[in-house]
Image: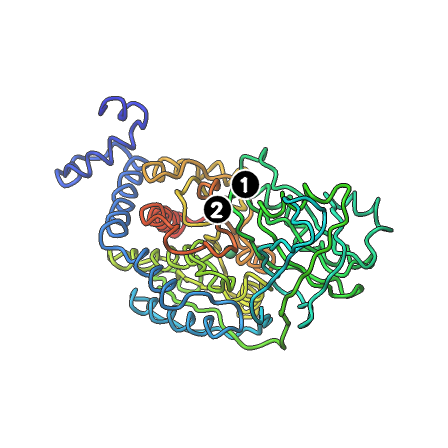
């Protein structure tokens, strides 16, 4: 067992093993500068991991956020409570400075319970003349139906090509987009990227041809019937029609009943968009010793959808980012560059917090080395993406050896998440994100079951370990 591990992990495992057994304290001289750096880095990363995995606050902070704050959509009372939580936790984590950055955000409210049912199709399974309930959630930013609701025949549309072909059939109808979350994409974020256009643009595209509402099959790989909400963007050229998400089982039942039958759907949603309101990014930092005017940012988004606690999305990214700061401070590490933790406002239905942070940094002429984000769930870490050129990416590949003992096995080319991407555009900063295992994320994403109980403490902490390690390496070696 030991020999096998030694063989497969090579030098690194040797160093880590020796560290654990006190080898380093025995004063064995390293062989050369590169090895010395590796050994020193390996030791420091081990100390970061030790504090995160033993006396860390990652999971405890997530428990507080999810159970005492809960849902925190932009403009809601929960969001302002979350701002207070963020400030307090950053202070308790020994940030040198904590502050709020003002940001105007959209203020969308669900306005009560959404309801839907369908009738028609005959037969016992179809319900005959009895209405069959649908479990729905209004899409974020959507307009409600009004108190009377909407009743109209439903048209099954499998994709936008079919919508174009059948555009003369949708006037006065409710369009039901039943586009599947493609199981052939092993990386589930690709399936999400492929399907999410029906949520984002489906309402306006159907409204263009006279549809009165849309129902969208949830972007999920789940086998349950939980509907998954998320933002839509209306095209101002067309009427703003109501839109809901439906769970996969209801979607399948409805789709199976429609061919050859007239099915009427009744929808009632109460949503409305209120005027923009003031909210804040919550920021904490550790001052750099050598380059205090150069910044490394790590963050997640503080807002979350209203039906749940936002544990995965993105409580996990927030507490991991805070833990990076806490752990660096706890082991007495003095960063060369200033390290900032940002809990971004309004990622879910506007992206205003991320844009505001980058705009303010640009206005202040700040130099940012890296914007790193965690917004892909609190699952076992697998890798990081970074927006580096091939040459630069090749130059940092030796870091993989340092991260591998903690689960990250690749640093690959890619963008950041939506909160840090503006830093790339506005500031020319390198952006990147943590890539955890993606197989279970879309069971919980934007759904009622995005709760603490579905986050594994250990997996969450391992994400924080790898983020802290990467931030340390960037601080030490640059990018
Ligand atoms: Zn998110």
Residue 435 appearing in the image: yes
- Residue drawn 56% across the image and 70% down it: 112
Could you classify mark 2 by the number of other residues whose Cα lies within 10 Å: few (under 14), some (14-19), or many (20 or more)? Answer: many
- Residue drawn 67% across the image and 61% down it: 267
Query: Are the two marked residues, 2 and 1, in contact with CB atoms closer than 8 angstroms?
Result: yes
Specify the label residue 188 is tagged with: 1
What is the secondary structure assignment of the residue under circle 2? helix
Could you classify mark 1 by the number of other residues whose Cα lies within 10 Å: few (under 14), some (14-19), or many (20 or more)? Answer: many
Residue in the foreground of this view, choosing between 440 and 155:
155
Residue 14, x across and y down, in percent: 24, 30
Residue 396, x across and y down, in percent: 44, 39
Left/right placement of residue 64 relative to residue 365 reads: left
Label 2 belongs to which residue? 441
- Residue drawn 49% across the image and 58% down it: 368
- Quadrant in which residue 278 is drawn: bottom right
CA–CA distance in space, label 2 to label 1: 8 Å
Q: Work out whether 405 lies above or below 145.
A: above
What is the secondary structure assignment of the residue under circle 1? helix
- Quadrant in which residue 264 is drawn: bottom right
């Amino acid at each position: 067992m030991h020999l096998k591990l030694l063989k497969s992990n090579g030098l690194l495992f040797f160093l880590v093993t020796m560290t654990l057994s006190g080898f380093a304290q025995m004063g064995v001289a390293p062989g050369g500068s590169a090895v010395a750096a590796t050994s020193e880095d390996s030791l420091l990363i081990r100390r970061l991991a030790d504090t995160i995995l033993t006396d860390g606050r990652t999971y405890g902070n997530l428990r507080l956020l999810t159970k005492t704050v809960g849902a925190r959509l932009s403009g809601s009372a929960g969001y302002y409570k979350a701002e207070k939580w963020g400030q307090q936790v950053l202070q308790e984590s020994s940030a040198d400075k904590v502050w709020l950055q003002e940001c105007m955000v959209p203020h969308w409210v669900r306005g009560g319970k959404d309801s839907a049912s369908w009738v028609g199709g005959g037969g016992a399974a179809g319900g005959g003349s009895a209405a069959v309930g649908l479990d729905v959630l209004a899409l974020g930013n959507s307009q409600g139906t009004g108190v009377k609701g909407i009743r109209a025949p439903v048209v099954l549309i499998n994709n936008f090509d079919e919508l174009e072909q059948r555009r003369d059939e949708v006037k006065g109808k409710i369009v039901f987009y039943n586009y599947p979350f493609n199981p052939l994409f092993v990386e589930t974020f690709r399936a999400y990227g492929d399907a999410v256009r029906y949520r984002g643009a489906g309402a306006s595209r159907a409204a263009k041809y006279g549809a009165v509402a849309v129902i969208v099959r949830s972007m999920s790989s789940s086998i349950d019937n939980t509907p998954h909400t998320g933002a839509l963007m209306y095209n101002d050229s067309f009427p703003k029609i109501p839109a809901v998400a439906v769970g996969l089982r209801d979607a399948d039942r409805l789709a199976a009943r429609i061919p050859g039958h007239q099915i009427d759907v009744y929808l009632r949603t109460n949503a409305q968009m209120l005027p923009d309101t003031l909210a804040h990014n919550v920021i904490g930092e550790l001052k750099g010793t050598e380059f205090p005017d150069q910044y490394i940012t790590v963050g997640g988004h503080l807002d979350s959808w209203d039906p749940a606690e936002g544990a995965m999305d993105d409580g996990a990214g927030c507490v991991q980012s805070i833990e990076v700061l806490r752990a660096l401070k706890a082991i007495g590490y003095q960063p060369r560059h200033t390290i900032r933790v940002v809990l971004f406002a309004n990622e879910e239905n506007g992206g205003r917090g991320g844009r505001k942070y980058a705009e303010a940094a640009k206005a202040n002429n700040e130099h940012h080395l890296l914007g790193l984000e965690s917004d892909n769930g609190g699952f076992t870490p697998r890798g990081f993406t970074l927006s580096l050129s091939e040459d630069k990416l090749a130059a940092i590949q030796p870091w993989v050896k340092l991260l591998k003992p903690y689960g990250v096995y690749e640093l690959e080319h890619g963008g950041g998440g939506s909160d840090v991407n503006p830093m790339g555009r506005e500031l020319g900063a390198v952006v990147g994100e943590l890539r955890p295992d993606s197989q279970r994320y879309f069971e919980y994403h934007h759904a009622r079951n995005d709760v603490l109980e579905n986050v594994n403490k250990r997996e969450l902490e391992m994400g924080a370990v790898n983020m802290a390690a990467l931030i340390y390496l960037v601080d030490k070696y640059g990018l």
